[in-house]
Image (tube, helix red, strand yellow):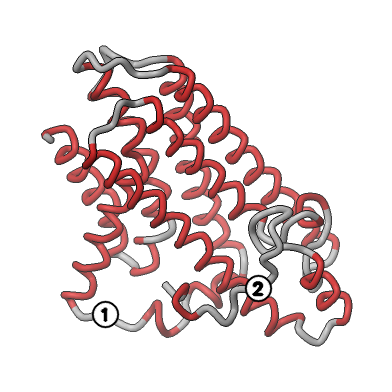
Amino acid sequence: MTYLLLLLAISFAISALGWVYFIYFFSIGYGLTISGLSVATLVIFRDNITLPVLLLCGVLFIYGIRLALYLFLRERRSASYKKILYQPENTTKKPLFVMFAIWTMCALLYVGQMSPATFYLYNLANGAPVNEVWAWVGAIVATMGVIIEMVADAQKSAAKKVNAHRFVDTGLYRIVRCPNYFGEVLMWTGSFLICFGACCTFWQWVIAIIGYIGIVYVMFSGARRLELRQTETYGNDPEFQKYIKKTPLILPFVPIYSVAKHKWLQA
């Protein structure tokens, strides 16, 4: 339990960036916290590190740093992103208890997301017969997810340079409308798969499942917000209407074309 409390303290400390600006709890603070927890996991269990878990933590570290840097630069360079970032709901001062509640939920969620690798190494250190095959499968799937996300972001940037006022439907965006969110779902799916070979206890499974469901919910919530913004911007474009009717929202080849009506996804 000590190791979880230490990771939780680190999560609280880094995600506290949200006290500077509320939205940082979920954006820059999120990326930096995941990177920090990746490093902390390797340091805490340095005597029991395996190659697949090292790969996974390395991938998550790169993901977190890249995300934080990407968001930081976009905030400074993109006028349209600034408009979204500094909406009234983000700039209005929140009651203190709300800030503490959001901070706590974020810190707990981030530890839950990182928990599969942590549990794998903890159980290995305590002599549990962990299965390294699952660790390799998880690490490879997570790596694929990060690559997809990076490629999607690069393709979107390239497309916007050609025509900043048109929706993106090239590259990975031909297959799914939110390939970057799909990449992140795939990344955390890979992380979660490690649990199947980690000899997890009941409560370890509970923590890992809550972390996984939580981040998948966040990704679908983000896809819903993007869908609403795109509908407002491009809704009268016949090409856009044709595009959204044939291209799944977030999961390739899964016929989920809209979640706009699902208000329970509002986070």
Horizontal and vertical percent position of residue 257: 70, 69
Q: Tell whether 78 sits left or right of 212.
A: right
Quadrant for the N terminus, please. top left
What residue do we see at 82% from left, 75% from top? 240
Dividing the picture into quadrants, the one containing residue 4 is top left
Marks 1/2 in contact by CB < 8 Å: the verdict is no
| Residue at the extreme left | 2
Q: Give the residue number, with chain letter if any, for mark 2.
A: 258
Foreground tag (1 vs 2): 2
Quadrant for the C terminus, please. bottom left
Tell me the kind of residue under disc 2: Ser
Image height of 172 relative to 26, above or below: above
Q: Which mark is residue 94?
A: 1
Horizontal and vertical percent position of residue 105: 26, 61
Q: Tell whether 161 sits left or right of 210.
A: right
Q: Tell whether 60 sits left or right of 101.
A: right
What residue do we see at 43% from left, 55% from top? 215
Dividing the picture into quadrants, the one containing residue 48 is top left
Horizontal and vertical percent position of residue 199: 30, 26
| Residue at the extreme right | 239
Decide which of 229, 177 is in the foreground and name it.
Answer: 177
Q: In this figure, what is the number of numbered marks? A: 2
Tell me the kind of residue under disc 1: Lys
Kindly tell me whether residue 157 is visible in this rendering: no
Decide which of 16, 243 is in the foreground and name it.
Answer: 243
Dividing the picture into quadrants, the one containing residue 122 is top left
Q: Tell whether 185 sits left or right of 198.
A: right
What residue do we see at 26% from left, 12% from top? 47
Horizontal and vertical percent position of residue 49: 34, 16
Q: Which mark is residue 4?
A: none
Decide which of 246, 92 is in the foreground and name it.
Answer: 246
